Amino acid sequence: MMEQIDDMLNNLIGEIDQLSQSLNSEDDTKEVKDASQEQSTFSIGFTDLKESLNELEDQDLDALVADLESKSSSEELLVCEEAAGLVEEHPLPALTHEPVTVPPEVTEEPSSLMQTTKAQTKLDKIKMALEKLKEAKVRKLIVKVLMSDGSSKTLMVDGRQTVRDVLDTLSEKSHCDQSINWSLCETNPELQIERDLEDHEFFVELLSDWIRHSENKVHFTARPHKYVMFTDPQLFYMWKKKISSQGVVNKQTKELLIKEHFGGSSVIVPDLEGKLYLKENGKKVWRPQYFLLRASGLYYVPKGKTKSSSDLACFVRFENVNVYTASNYREKFKAPTSFCFVLKHPCIQKDSPYIKILCCGDQDSLLLWVTSIRIAKYGPVLYQNYQEAVKRVSSLQTVRSKDAPRLQDQDGQSNGNTFVVNPCADPSLPISTPAEFDSDLDEPPPDFIPPSPPRHAPL
Amino acid sequence: MAAWDLSVIVEDLGADAPPITISVASDLHIGGVILKLVEKMQIKRDWSDHALWWEQKQRWLLRTAWTLEKCEVHADARLIFMPQHKPLKLGLPNGLTLKLRACFSNPVFQTVMGICRLLSIRHPEELSLLRPVEEKKKKKDKDLSEDIYDLTEVPLSSVSRPCLYNGMPAHFADSDKLEAVYKMLSVTQPLPAPEAIAKQYRPASVVDKAHINGRWLDSSRCLMQQGVKENDRLWLRFKFFSFYDIDPKYDVVRVTQLYEQARWAILLEDIDCTEEEMMLFGSLQYHISKVSQSEPQMLCSSAALDDLETALQSLEVKMEGESSSASELLKTMTAPELNDYLKIFRPKRLTLKGYKQYWFKFQDTSISYFKSKEESIGEPIQQINLKGCEVAPDVNVAAQKFLIKLLIPAPEGMNEVYLRCENEQQYAEWMAACRLASKGKSLADSTFQSEIDSIRSFLAMQKTNGSQGHADAGDESINPHSLVSPRYHKKYKPKQLTPRILDAYQNVAQLSLTDALMRFLQIWQALPDFGLSYVVVRFKGSRKDEVLGIAPNRLIRIDLGVGDVVKTWRYNNMKQWNVNWDIKQVAIEFEGNVNIAFSCLTADCKIVHEYIGGYIFMSTRSREKSDVLNEELFHKLTGGHEAL
């Protein structure tokens, strides 16, 4: 059984090699066609490829060239020029149509020591095969990112890189200080909205939703509210309490709140509810409506109904929408306040009735809703992102020399709604590693223990 | 020391047998009494599980080294010599009854530990026993015909060390009968008939929900002391909703029973959810019942093989993923595609024209259409990429309406497109293709066929329910009313429910059995009211009944007039709590000089005490200590000092 799979995998890997070589020539002709068809793909901040290449830093350029040389370079470059800034490579088409099914018996095989080692080598082979498959189709993109000091940096990003990876590259290039708050913020000037990209998202994939000649920009900026749900969980999980009593929340309580809401097998969404103004499709009026947030989506109380679960009407689920903060909607749409947020499918780039616009009473409430919706949408991933960010920062702090010039993490860089959170939470302060939830975090039993109930009196 | 006569009833001799009298002295220890008794009876058998129960004082004489004097036993004492383990009918979370031997002499906390060891459920501290809700016995014969699974044969000594044999704990592997019991415990039950759901008691209010909590047994006292008799019926349920370290690999029975308890809580509206959530729960139940019937559960597996399996699966997925975005040119040569005449309608376009027929081609993740089949070699009239779109069914089998509603995202907004199919087969294929494409998968994906099958089985569901007079309702057909609470039985007809559940189903259809069970539990745990146990109380200084909700991390006060939470207290702010057993009042002090006190109306205050202390106990568990259950701490926190 095992041998069969081995053979199969060996064949597979060989096949991949063959295909990626033999298809190179075919590829080029295809690429030209593709590129001309896909001219609608975007250039990120450039008018043409030459400009974008000029702005690339040396080592990136070297890498790009080396990369292209491994293919038949001249034609590829031509392709790139047509695609204006977008370097796309996708060779290796066909192989996949041969269905690769694994004999089901494998899983039923009882394990033994010998087989475990075999399984291990097989695992390695599988990993190799997966890597090859991945490399075979990688999309590359040259992107201009606006820095918070007004300058810009140009990078080459490939399809496998997450926002986290891009952030790491940028922090290195800009020698900025260590903070978990550095974000990549996507702005859409046409809709006057912006969104901080989440660390786990794939950067190239996000940008591919932009239309050609989009005015959209990506900013590298520090956002004090990026992980506010972890630095100040009480804002979301004790929001009903007065701010004054929230202020005295100690570190232990915060850790406990995080453990309770993010440490279990499912993330608990803040039980947020309240009145929001809804801009109805195509109408100019803003209608007040009572909304409730649940893990399964955003709900409202229909007219004449109660808040009980079975009465609630679903306003939107989060699978297919992202949450954006809007700026200046008071002017643009005559919103009751300037604290608006938007829920829309990432593909939608222009004004449309499919964009849902909501307006909050004040800044705090806007932060509460937007952050809580992020918790509902992303769940445990958000916590992993935070832990990863904290880990990066603490490891960087030890590695990096202190005399390097640094970009300062300044609050309120961007033009949109920026949240001023708890003033005591200085984002540039080093953050302690998130608790690993071990014994020292567990609540000690209270020292006072009530007495036992009286025993039954003897008959 | 003077000898006197002690009469002991031996339970095993029968109810009518006269007591056996032995001559004892006050300095004789209990072990000696038992020895004398056994000698006098002259019956050769294993008496090791037997002990003396003192009827009048309602207590066991378990300390064999203590003398009769120390135990305060005199000649007037009526002692009963009986086994400590007796058969008990245990109602399981899945609704079935299991007969087993439970310990009647140790505190219930230990009895539950023993039961859980037998059933191979980890973390027994999360479960407890309660008295069942009396069922109205309309049909007496029904009780007799009830299937009772029997575990009383399992030798008690064999359970102490759980080791796996043939994928199940060794004590289940002895006979086919026991194997069947394990299967019952570890495999989810088939979907209940809608009538079975409707027949069961459903709490109509939060006060109704409070009543069940008055039935919990006291963890610090034994079954005998709480009036439980041999062959009595008790329920085993998860009581503390803080599930520690769930690992599907080691927790097969635990996860299955937890799922069953959660499923019934939702079906009987013991926990509230929205309509969307109900449909999602329904689709998961459908999926779980389907998969658990077809997929024999993987009970034992080494870690390495598990990893391999996942790696192979992801390899498979990856490769299919690649194919979906591979080059156009080669796709046409190899990739499967659909071609057919369909009708299209765009509701948002300002046109009076209705559905128009075109020749459609489904390729990769895109639909293109042409004037006719003959023109399909040229440029299409339009090509629509369905990646990231929303797909909704609009089907009425009786009316032969097969509509696929597509909502396709574009920079300018969403485009609405309706595709009309002629028949079931065509619909199932195109619908399956649309669903896969919306997730970025092509027709080459291995799940294409199973997607078609599941759509067809949903159509079948609609067909059999649409015409109830038909006799062709085979055993495999499922009534969608089996998947939702009775509220929706009234609100929707089966054929209205089917597309709603199908809609939710598309997001869960690819889950493995374990993942589907875990997803169900996760969504359940994410409900706002999850983990709340209610008790009707009267707060000190207040004249009206209110409800106290006890959650894993907090107490909430619900005003019955407002019907809403008016106050929340978190345990980590708790400084101390006290119970006044005379006036049955619980008093709690929180940080910041917050004092509350209440008397409990629907449950004994020991139960409330045990809930609060129990949750504090649950929060002290940690990985290093998890091997050994700190029973002493549990009793300390829950007011059961004397049980130690």
Image: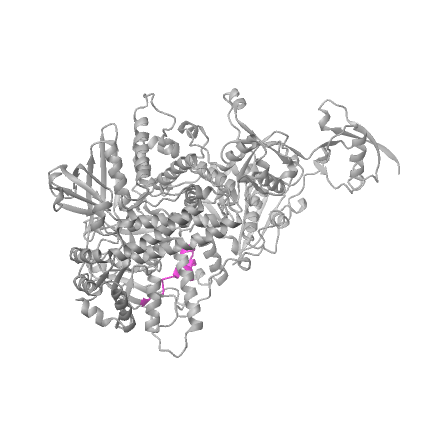
In the image, is A269 to the left or to the right of A325?
Answer: right
Relative image position of residue B507 (x, y in whole percent):
34, 43
Residue furthest to the bottom in view is A403
Q: Nearer the viewer, residue B618 or A451?
A: B618
Q: Which residue sits at x=48%, y=50%? A: B304
Quadrant of image for the N terminus of chain B: top right
Residue B236 in view (yes/no):
yes
The magenta region covers: A221-242
Location of residue A103 by image quarter? top left
Instruction: Say whether residue B590 is magenta.
Output: no
Does A53 sit above or below residue B336? below
Location of residue B501 by image quarter? top left
In the image, is A124 to the left or to the right of B350?
Answer: right
Q: Which residue sits at x=44%, y=63%? A: A247
Does B105 sit above or below residue A445? above
Relative image position of residue A335 (x, y in whole percent):
23, 56
Relative image position of residue B71 (x, y in whole percent):
77, 40
Relative image position of residue A455 (x, y in whole percent):
67, 41
Q: Nearer the viewer, residue B20 or B640?
A: B20
In the image, is A131 to the left or to the right of B382?
Answer: right
Instruction: Say whether residue A227 is magenta.
Output: yes
In the image, is B558 to the left or to the right of B390?
Answer: right
Residue A417 in view (yes/no):
no
Q: Nearer the viewer, residue B359 or A196?
A: B359
Judging from the image, the colouring scheme is one colour
